[in-house]
Amino acid sequence: MRILVVDDEIELAEAIGKALRREGYAADVVHTAAAAIDVTSYTPYDLITLDLTLPDGDGRDICRSIRSGHDHQPRILMLTARDDIGERVAGLDDGADDYLVKPFALPELFARVRTLLRRDTDASAGALLTSNGLTVDTAAHRVLWKDVEIEMTAKEFALLRYFMTHSNDVLSQEHLLEHVWDAAADPFTNTVRVTVGTLRRKLTAATGVQWIDTVIGAGYRFAPPKTPN
C-alpha cells in the first residue's frame, strides 16, 4: 500500500514516513500544500496522512481538492494538534475518513491506517487477512500457512498484503510499482517481476499450491486455490 505523509514538521513527517516503511508500506513525504496537490495529481495513493496546518495552505483545502478533482480516491487521515470537536467535524465533512490528534502513539497511527486500508475489503477481519489456510497478520507482520510461519522480506510481505486485498484482480507491473513501491523506486527496474517471483516461490514451497498467476500481457493475479492443500 502506498501512503503520502503531508506535514510541515519535517522531523515528525520523516519519522512517520520511516515508521510506515518499517511496517511494510511504501511511504512518500512532502511538507507543503503545493507539493501535496502536485504529487497527488499523478500518483494514486492508497492513503494520505494530512496535517491541517501547512505553511502555504490548509489541509482541509487539500482534502476538498482531492475529493472533488481526482478519479482515484485515497483514504484520508487528518493529523492535527487542533483538539476541537468543531474542527474534527469540519474535517470529516470536507471528506476526511478519520481524524487523529497530535501527539499520538505510533501503534495507534498504525491501527488507524490498517483500519482505513481495510475498508474496501473485509473490515470484520481485524488485522488478519485470510485465504484458504493462508493468513497474513498485518499487525504482527507474520505470514502463516496452517499455523506454520513463512519467512518474508518486508517487500514480499507488502506485496502479499496488497495481493490479498485485491484477490482475483489482474494487476499490472506498473500498478504494483505505484502501490507497493515508493517514489525512490526506479520505474525501469525489474524489481516487480523479481519480487513477484520470489514471493510466488515461497508460497508454493510452503503450501504446495500455486497462488499467483501470470496473465500474459496484463500482469499478475492472486488467485487462491479453491481447496486448501
Image: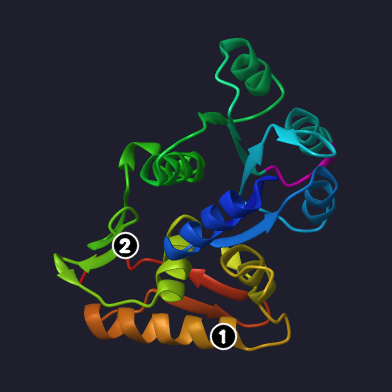
In this rendered view, identify the residue nearer to me: 105 or 38: 105
What amino acid type is highlighted by mark number 1?
Answer: Arg
| Residue 8 magenta-highlighted | no
Q: Which residue is mark 1?
A: 193
Which sits earlier in the primary sequence, circle 2 or circle 1?
A: 2
The residue sitting at 23% across, 81% down in the picture is 206
Q: Quadrant of residue 154?
A: bottom left
Q: Which range of residues does the magenta coloring cover?
A: 69-73
Vertical side of 103 occupied by 30: above or below: below
In this rendered view, identify the residue nearer to me: 8 or 153: 8
Tell me residue 49's x, y (percent).
Answer: 61, 43
| Residue 70 magenta-highlighted | yes
The residue sitting at 32% across, 42% down in the picture is 126
Magenta-drawn stretch, dominant element (helix, strand or loop):
loop
In this rendered view, identify the residue nearer to me: 207 or 78: 78
Please tell me whether mark 1 sits on a helix, a strand or a loop: helix
Marks 2 and 1, how far apart in space? 22 Å
Q: Quadrant of residue 86?
A: top right
Q: Which residue is mark 2?
A: 141
